């Protein structure tokens, strides 16, 4: 017999439509990572691989007759804690969002989460920045998450941005709390601005009713806690 038997955890099985157990015919020498991805599951979704010999890494080469248990990434993911599949410890939780989850990126910025996003990103840009800056990739695109440069990522299940935020917050253990410490347009950390220095850029009503302002050092957009701010906070709540 030239096949291995996979036992995918229910969560993966249901989402990716896999049989249980699943018999996979070995046609060539391939790593477990390549086989799992050929079955449609991006490596970023896998939290643990157990073989007859114990925990395995992504480079494990399955032998005929082997039985393999595949478990999903479990919440809350802590990128600082190394695992067998992801032995590198990252300094902090940071994100990069694919073009298909732009509204989710804005919501994460409202929480103060460092989240890169641009509507001009190509897959290769996302993968490059994720590796370069050690960022978790958020995407609805399975193909992107199969890229080898990406270590941490989430195939976002929900289609509605508010539900996506709930999903990502649960997986990465984020506090859902409005911080407004980052520019919603460019992700930079806001800095306090002196009213007298920016007063010429304010509309008369804003000038009259508000005294505390922040400015983005990147795009120079001015932020204050007006009705738009209250609306965003109530959405987050
Ligand atoms: Zn900005």
Image: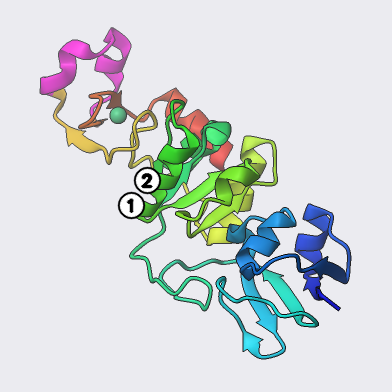
The numbered dot on residue 129 is 2
Residue 214 sits in quarter: top left
Residue located at (36% from left, 61% from top): 92
Whether 202 is among the magenta residues is yes
Mark 2, other Cα within 10 Å: few <14 / some 14–19 / many ≥20:
some
Q: Is residue 83 above or below residue 42?
A: below
SS for dot 2: helix
Whether 203 is among the magenta residues is yes
The numbered dot on residue 133 is 1
Front one among 183 and 203: 183
* Residue 16, horizontal then vertical, whole percent: 78, 54
* Alpha-carbon span between mark 2 and mark 1: 6 Å
Q: Is residue 7 visible?
A: yes
Front one among 126 and 156: 126
The numbered dot on residue 42 is none
* Residue 68, horizontal then vertical, whole percent: 74, 78
Region in magenta? 196-211
């Amino acid at each position: 017999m030239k096949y291995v038997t996979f036992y995918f955890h229910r969560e993966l099985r249901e989402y990716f439509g896999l049989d249980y157990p699943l018999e996979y015919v070995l046609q060539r020498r391939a790593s477990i990572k390549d086989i799992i991805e050929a079955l449609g599951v991006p490596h970023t979704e896998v939290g643990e691989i157990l073989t007859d010999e114990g925990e395995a890494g992504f480079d494990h080469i399955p032998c005929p007759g082997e039985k393999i248990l595949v478990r999903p990434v479990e919440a809350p993911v802590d990128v600082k804690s190394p695992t067998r599949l992801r032995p590198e410890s990252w300094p902090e939780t940071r994100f990069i969002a694919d073009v298909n989850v732009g509204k989710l990126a804005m919501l994460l910025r409202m929480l103060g989460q460092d989240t890169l996003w641009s509507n001009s990103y190509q897959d290769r840009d996302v993968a490059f920045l994720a590796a370069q800056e050690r960022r978790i990739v958020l995407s609805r695109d399975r193909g992107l998450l199969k890229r080898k440069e990406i270590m941490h990522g989430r195939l976002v299940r929900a289609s509605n941005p508010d539900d996506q935020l709930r999903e990502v917050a649960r997986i990465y253990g984020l506090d859902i709390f409005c911080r407004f410490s980052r520019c919603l347009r460019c992700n930079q950390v806001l800095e306090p601005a002196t009213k007298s220095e920016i007063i010429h850029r304010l509309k008369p009503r804003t000038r009259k009713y508000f005294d505390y302002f922040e400015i983005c050092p990147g795009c120079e957009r001015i932020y204050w806690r007006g009705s738009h701010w209250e609306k965003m906070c109530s959405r987050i709540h």
